[in-house]
Image (spheres, rainbow, N blue to C red):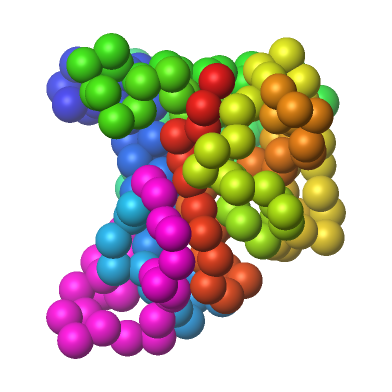
Amino acid sequence: MALITRAAKYSDLFEWQLYNAAAVGMGLTGENYLYNNPLACRGGITRKAWYAVPCCPSNLSRTWADLGKYIYSTDQNAVWIHQYIGSQTKLNPGGAVEITLRRTHPRVKRHQNKADLTRGPLVYCLESVDNPGVDIFSARLEPTTLHAEYAADLLGGITLLSGQTTDGASLTFIPYHLWANRGESQMMVWVKV
């Protein structure tokens, strides 16, 4: 659709899916996988080296191997940049990227008064390993406390989101695609607000 319409929304959707659906499947080492992408986990889900139905490793490998085909497109008169991925494009690393809280739809009764956090194309989550002593399923975020910070020693170097609960407890959010890389844990995308 991006090639047919030249509408940026299709490139944005591809980027969203790349980071929040495809990337979560493959572990940081490239040697273990998640078969599904749950938005909450109370334990029992870990990355595995192989599955009885091994479609994910080959599909993920094919996606990453073909990624170069999705960065740029051209015709006789123009070049379109669809993704800012490890190319010669220069971006300002100190530039502000907005943190967004997207509230659930009112008809989704199970997640009323909850929101997910995004920063750029990345969805963030709470993982129990980063939030000891906090019940990540009942914690209520105070949105005004949120800020992004770079953690060079965490998961190969990431931008995490820090904040506090309404009770003053610290909360650490990591990019969703990186959860379950440090052993079995609990995880939640939808946070109470």
Stretch of the chain drawn in magenta: 39-65
Q: Is residue 123 visible?
A: no
Q: Quick check: 11 above or below 59? A: above
- In the image, residue 58 lies in the stretch drawn in magenta: yes
Q: Quick check: 128 above or below 91? A: below
Q: Quick check: 84 above or below 155? A: above
Image side of residue 166 versus residue 35, left or right: right
User: Which x, y percent locates residue 151?
Assistant: 81, 49
Number of marks: 0
| Residue under the point 54% across and 38% down | 138
| Residue under the point 78% across and 36% down | 169
Image side of residue 151 versus residue 63, left or right: right
| Residue under the point 73% across and 56% down | 132
User: Which x, y percent locates residue 5?
Assistant: 19, 16
- In the image, residue 30 lies in the stretch drawn in magenta: no
User: Which x, y percent locates residue 70?
Assistant: 35, 42
| Residue under the point 45% across and 24% down | 114
Image side of residue 159 versus residue 62, left or right: right
Judge by depth and name the residue closer to the eye, 142 or 138: 138
> Quadrant location of residue 1?
top left
Q: Quick check: 91 above or below 19? A: above
Q: Is residue 102 visible?
A: yes
> Quadrant location of residue 183?
bottom right
User: Which x, y percent locates residue 118?
Assistant: 53, 28
Judge by depth and name the residue closer to the eye, 92 or 31: 31
